[in-house]
Amino acid sequence: MTASTLDRPAAPAGPSRRRGGQGVERRPGFLTYGLLLAFLIGGAYPLWWSFVVGSRGNTALTSTWPPLLPGGVFWQNVTEVVTTVPFWLALGNSVIVSVVITASVVLFSTLAGYAFAKLRFRGREGLMIFVIATLAVPTQLGIIPLFMVMKQFGWTGTLGAVIVPTLVTAFGVFFTRQYLVDTIPDELIEAARVDGASMIGTFWHVGLPAARPAMAVLGLFTFMTAWTDYLWPLLVVPQNPTLQVALSQLQSAKYVDYAVVLSGAVLATVPLLLLFVVAGRQLISGIMQGAVKG
Amino acid sequence: MTSTLSRSRQAPPAPRPTAPAPQRLTFRQRLNRWDVLLSPYLYVSPFFLLFALVGLFPLGYTLVVSLNDWNLLTGPGEWVGLGNFTAELADPLFWNSLFNTMSIFVISAVPQLVLGLVIAAVLDQNLRAKTFWRMSVLLPYVVTPVAVALIFSNMFGEKYGLVNNLLVGLGLDPVMWKTELWPSHFAIAAMVDWRWTGYNALILLAAMQAVPKDIHESAAIDGAGAVRRFFSITIPSIRPTLIFVVITMTIGSLQIFAEPKLFNATTATPGGPHREYQTTVLYLWDLAFQRQSFGKAAAVAWLLFLLIVIIGLVNFLLSQRIASGSSPRERRRGRRAPEGRDALTSAPTYAEIQQRGL
């Protein structure tokens, strides 16, 4: 489940891979890299093409064979984007929402996951099964009453309405619990307790440092989820939008200026693209760990 | 605070004071006891409090709303009992949305699975620049569904779309991607697949890497080629993961919203001029916030929930049966875990669900 447990079974296979008995693990040939290149182009092309249209204007849309190189009007279209919708406000809102949700989910989930993994208390099993059961409850189910509650409180239009429902998630609790259960030796906690640390002190000095890798992965995915969320922000903050809501508003006019819309799509992708460049490795190992758990 | 001092206070190795001697407890000791007793509950309480507020309460309240003739603007109306449920179950538009959801699921899941397996198999080699290639297949995942919907909505434009331009350029007829049933389902499935195939490929890749290499080696010595090994060794070994991926795809596609909503901005009804690609969540949104019938929308929400629970149960039963001791993970766990709580360890598939659910 951890990076280390994931890699461990693969590690002994490493040397034998290179030895390559009977062609099981020899270096792959051109066909392999050709395929990989094709996947890369398939994955990148729609994004690239959006940039081409955004930088060439709508004339790029009418030619039979799509132009491959960008033009020179990208900044004009970007200006159009930021004046048509409150882009900077939306960007700021998205950052606030995603950061607060991420911080809160990581902190509270780690706390709860630690308790479930390492502390003994009455009802632990039952409560944990409850947490797992709630994983299956889709968020869409509650949007109607939740919307009514937010309206009642007068929270609609404020970022609080977006943030509060996801301050701590069952997924986070479950994820950190699974990680910590094998990571921290019980002796370590006992030693800390024997040395006179309080419960919270033990968590702080033993649990938290051990949980750091899991927290990073959880934080990354929580951030992604919060950032990409569309349905709920659309309901509660249409006038004070998050980035996704603002982006969708680019298209709501009767006449759709696609060069502007696509410039917006490219522009809105930049932050996550940067995140991807910085933390892509962790994202990948997070996804692959999830698979090993499953 | 020195260790000798506290050691004398504690019962030897256990963190809990096992032998209570009420008479001689100091204040610190009593504090410590409460600390041990209450801290775990304190730590897990944020989740349960919040879940009660934004999970449990809405669940119950949705039921109440669904039993009323509730309007978005005028509020609660008459008590109609199960009227909303029977009305929805008799409403062709509800079934239309379910049909569209299922159809888009099937059209997207099959190619996604095949392509995901191919990508995973290609990645599961002794590659140079491993991380680069893995990142490259994950690239579409960082494009948000809204952006994906905008981009593909343009690419599948009927008049000046990239796809139709190419079709015409090749001498074919343009396809009415946004107004006809199957083409529109195909286009939306393409959006889903573009964003998720690489993600699922990495999950499958992780499963493939857990297959012991010596099995492959001995099969190769026996003369099995790469293709044969793929179908006879790889696929059977990763079957549990395959099933998990399929289940998460099901749950994920039950919740598709942004793609069909933004696919065609010019129609008055969300999801196509004649609701050709109106999915169930989009239908729910339309019902509640456009047609303002909260009662009926709440009933739809519950029906959707029941569907997801059924799928979740099937998932659970399947995974219990299939994953029983066959995967390397299970073996690894068996070595060290005396708890043997399979319910806890086999559920992570839900984690994936949650990831995609939002």
Image (tube, coloured by chain):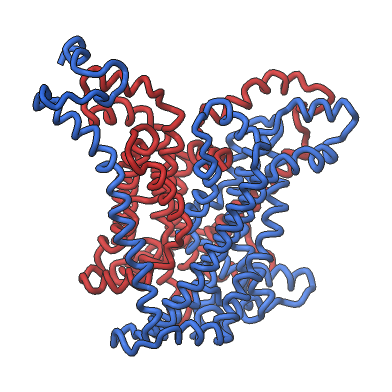
Chain colours: A red, B blue
Position of residue B192 relative to residue A180, above or below, is below
Q: How many marks?
A: 0
Q: Give x and y (percent) for residue A229.
A: 42, 60
Judged left or right of residue B348, residue A240 is: left
Judged left or right of residue B357, residue A119 is: left
Residue at left 18%, top 17%?
A: B9
The part of the image, by quadrant, that contains residue A208 is top left
Q: Give x and y (percent) for residue A55.
A: 50, 61
Residue at left 39%, top 35%?
A: A117
Q: Give x and y (percent) for residue B84.
A: 45, 84
Residue at left 14%, top 27%?
A: B22
Position of residue A91 relative to residue B240, above or below, is below
Position of residue B219 relative to residue B175, above or below, is above
The part of the image, by quadrant, that contains residue A21 is top right
In this view of the protein, can residue B273 be seen by the observer?
no
Position of residue A77 relative to residue B29, above or below, is below
The part of the image, by quadrant, that contains residue A110 is top left
Q: Single out the residue that lies furthest toward the right.
A: B223
Q: Single out the residue that lies furthest toward the bottom.
A: B78
In this view of the protein, can residue B250 be seen by the observer?
yes
Q: Give x and y (percent) for residue B126.
A: 70, 29
Nearest the eye: A76 or B139:
B139
**Quadrant location, the C terminus of chain A:** top right
Residue at left 49%, top 67%?
A: B305
